[in-house]
Amino acid sequence: MTRTEINDIIVNEIKKVLENDTVELNAETVIQDIPEWDSLNNVDLEMTLETECGIDFEVGEFEELKTLADMIDTVKKKVN
């Protein structure tokens, strides 16, 4: 799985959860800084990544990831 594929999964899920196709996201976006984002959305994103990418996060691991780049890097390591 490429970084672009992982990025697309994350971005698409965030837009779906927020019901906002116009939200602007980049590698430096801190997910928790998105005003509409909450802990339930974080759990949804974590579960989607585990399912879509065939990976598992350790307890508390996902919550430590701050930026979109952190998420992409971590998922990339886990799928390879």
Image (spheres, rainbow, N blue to C red):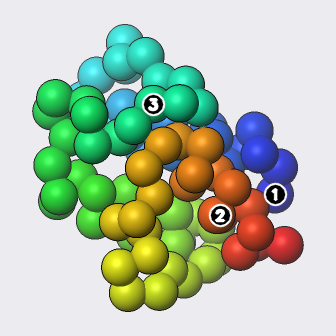
Seen in the image, is 61 located left or right of residue 28? left
Q: Where is residue 25 drawn, in percent x and y?
A: 47, 24
Question: Is there a contact, CB below 8 Å, between mark 1 and mark 2?
Answer: yes
Question: Is there a contact, CB below 8 Å, between mark 2 and mark 3?
Answer: no
Q: CA distance from mark 1 to mark 2?
A: 9 Å
Q: Which residue is mark 1?
A: 1
Residue 76 in view (yes/no): yes
Residue 5 position by quadrant: top right
| Residue 57, placed above or below residue 73 | below
Badge 2: how crowded within 10 Å, few (<14), some, or many (20+)?
Answer: many
Residue 75 position by quadrant: bottom right
Q: Amino acid at mark 1?
A: Met
Q: Where is residue 18 drawn, in percent x and y?
A: 24, 34
Q: Secondary structure at mark 3?
A: loop
Seen in the image, is 66 located left or right of residue 77? left
Q: Amino acid at mark 2?
A: Val
Q: Which residue is at 64% across, 63% downward?
A: 74
The answer to which of 20 and 40 lies nearer the viewer is: 40
Q: Which residue is mark 2?
A: 75
Numbered tag placed on residue 29 in the rendering: 3
Q: Where is residue 2 drawn, in percent x and y?
A: 83, 49
Labels 2, 3: front one: 3
Label whose residue precedes the other's in the sequence (1 or 3): 1
Badge 1: how crowded within 10 Å, few (<14), some, or many (20+)?
Answer: few
Seen in the image, is 31 located left or right of residue 18? right
Q: Which residue is at 35% across, 40% downward?
A: 31
Label whose residue precedes the other's in the sequence (2 or 3): 3
Q: Which residue is at 56% across, 54% downward?
A: 71
Q: Secondary structure at mark 1?
A: loop
Count of numbered badges drawn on the protein:
3
Labels 1, 3: front one: 3
